[in-house]
């Protein structure tokens, strides 16, 4: 346990220039506290002590402002920076050395059972306020911009921005130019699709004489 704690502290000091000492990280970093409290909660969850596991996770939430469901799988060297408002769902998986900033959500759509939250590969960066919603994979070394809403898988070594998020860089090269003004509205797109389907059905029914 002591060896794991040392690795967690070293990983934070390596990536956070504001971390001045190991004592500061250990005593004052809420992201580290949330992860340390998550470890026993997750162990209890796997042993089916669900109520006790959830008690620990809720206590951690009150203490740190970070909500990690005890069922979530968190790798080593994960940095939850600032951390306020971070939510990580029950079936989410976070790979080693990921960085998650304040206000980020690893959530589901509320419709599925079983695996319903995202899986982050290694070294993924999730910007502040970003939302990743659904049971899909974010590839290793991916970067998700602040306030982006990710609704589908992202390849490794990619950078995604926008609502809904789209890949603008892959392996260090631009793949598209983001239009900050004419970002597509997913609701309007879905409404147009439904309208097209209704028109098609009406046409079929009309051809069969089934419409008045």
Image (cartoon, rainbow, N blue to C red):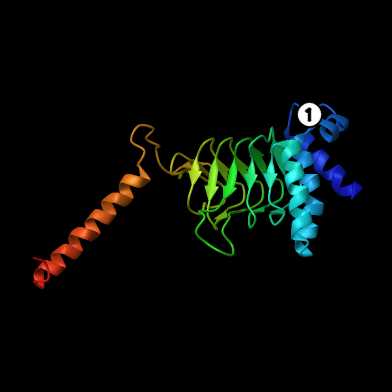
- Residue 42 drawn at (x, y percent): 76, 56
Residue 20 appears left or right of 90 = right
- Residue 135 visible in the snapshot: yes
Using the image, determine if residue 95 lies above or below residue 201: above
- Residue 171 visible in the snapshot: no
Q: Residue at x 45, y 39 (%)?
A: 162
Using the image, determine if residue 15 lies above or below residue 43: above
List the single residue furthest toward the bottom.
208
List the single residue furthest toward the right.
2
Q: Residue at x 52, y 61 (%)?
A: 112
* Residue under label 1: 19
Q: Quadrant of residue 197?
A: bottom left
- Residue 172 drawn at (x, y percent): 53, 42
Q: Residue at x 29, y 50 (%)?
A: 191
- Residue 175 drawn at (x, y percent): 43, 44
> Circle 1: is it few (<14), some (14-19), or many (20+) Cα within 10 Å?
some
- Residue 96 drawn at (x, y percent): 71, 50
Q: Quadrant of residue 23?
A: top right
**Front residue of 100 and 27:** 27
Q: Quadrant of the C terminus?
A: bottom left
**Front residue of 49 and 35:** 49
Dot 1: element? loop
């Amino acid at each position: 346990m002591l060896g794991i704690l040392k690795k967690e502290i070293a990983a934070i000091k390596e990536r956070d220039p504001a971390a001045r000492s190991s004592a500061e990280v250990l005593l004052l970093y809420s992201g580290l506290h949330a992860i340390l409290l998550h470890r026993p909660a997750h162990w209890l969850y796997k042993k089916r002590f669900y109520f006790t596991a959830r008690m620990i996770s809720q206590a951690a939430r009150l203490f740190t402002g970070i909500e990690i469901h005890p069922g979530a799988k968190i790798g080593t060297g994960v940095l939850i920076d600032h951390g306020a408002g971070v939510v990580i769902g029950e079936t989410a998986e976070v790979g080693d050395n990921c960085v998650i900033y304040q206000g980020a959500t690893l959530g589901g759509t509320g419709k599925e059972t079983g695996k319903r939250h995202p899986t982050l590969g290694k070294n993924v960066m999730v910007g502040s306020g970003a939302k990743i919603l659904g049971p899909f994979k974010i590839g290793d070394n991916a970067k998700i911009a602040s306030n982006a809403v990710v609704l589908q898988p992202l390849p490794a070594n990619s950078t995604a921005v926008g609502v809904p998020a789209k890949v603008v860089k892959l392996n260090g090269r631009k793949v598209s130019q983001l239009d900050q003004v004419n970002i597509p509205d997913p609701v309007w797109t879905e409404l147009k699709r439904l309208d097209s389907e209704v028109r098609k059905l009406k046409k079929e029914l009309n051809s069969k004489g089934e419409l008045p």
